[in-house]
Image (cartoon, grey):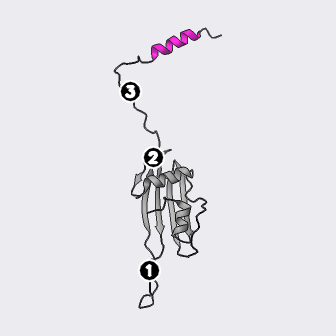
Amino acid sequence: MNTHTPAALLAALLLAAPAVGTSASPTPAPAPADSAATTTLRLTVTGPTPATTAPAPDSTAAPAPAPRTVTLHCDPPGGDHPRADAACADLDASQGRVDRESDTACALLYDPVEVRAEGVWRGRPVSFARQYGNSCELNARTGAVFAF
């Protein structure tokens, strides 16, 4: 049988708590113990091909576009992604999914764009690669994530 009364427990709690109005400095919030809540993604976009108005004089094909790569950090937003705040907000809104449904109507122009996302979203591994038919489709389906 428990011999402690509720009044005795309350008194013990009050004695253990710091007095109100004391000058003791507040305890800072603890730093994350591990990286379980961090987000760090390496994002790469390749394409679309450069627009040309006429074929090259030597009839060679246009050179393949060079990939563009940035790093995105969230919590807090950062890295070298130019729209880190918006990209992190889009990932948070979609629960970390890079690609999502969209009602946006895009022109049926085939100008492919390849994207890749590798890293961690809130401690969960991310490995995403996809080719979109054009930049409109990419933007509609991924928001600000690949907007760089």
CA neighbours of label 3 inside 10 A, class few (<14), some (14 to 19), many (20+): few
Q: Amino acid at mark 3?
A: Pro
Magenta run includes residue 9: yes
Q: Nearer the viewer, residue 89 or 78?
A: 89
Q: Which structural element holds mark 3?
A: loop
Residue drawn at point x = 45 percent, y = 39 percent: 32
Give the residue pinned by disc 3: 26
Q: Outermost residue, right direction?
A: 1
Q: Position of residue 50 (x, y in %)?
A: 44, 77
Give the residue pinned by disc 2: 75
Instruction: Tell me which segment is drawn in magenta.
Output: 1-17
Q: Position of residue 34 (x, y in %)?
A: 47, 42
Q: Amino acid at mark 2?
A: Asp
Q: Mark 3 and mark 2 in contact (Cβ < 8 Å)?
A: no
When asked about the image quadrant of residue 103, the answer is bottom right
Note whether 27 is above or below 108 in the view shown: above
When asked about the image quadrant of residue 141, the answer is bottom right
Residue drawn at point x = 55 percent, y = 52 percent: 96
Give the residue pinned by disc 1: 63
**In whole angstroms, how far apart are the C-alphas of marks 2 and 3?**
23 Å
Q: Amino acid at mark 1?
A: Pro
Left or right position of 143 against 80: right
When asked about the image quadrant of residue 68, the answer is bottom left
Residue drawn at point x = 54 percent, y = 9 percent: 8
Q: Mark 1 and mark 3 in contact (Cβ < 8 Å)?
A: no
Note whether 17 is above or below 74 in the view shown: above
Q: Which structural element holds mark 2?
A: loop
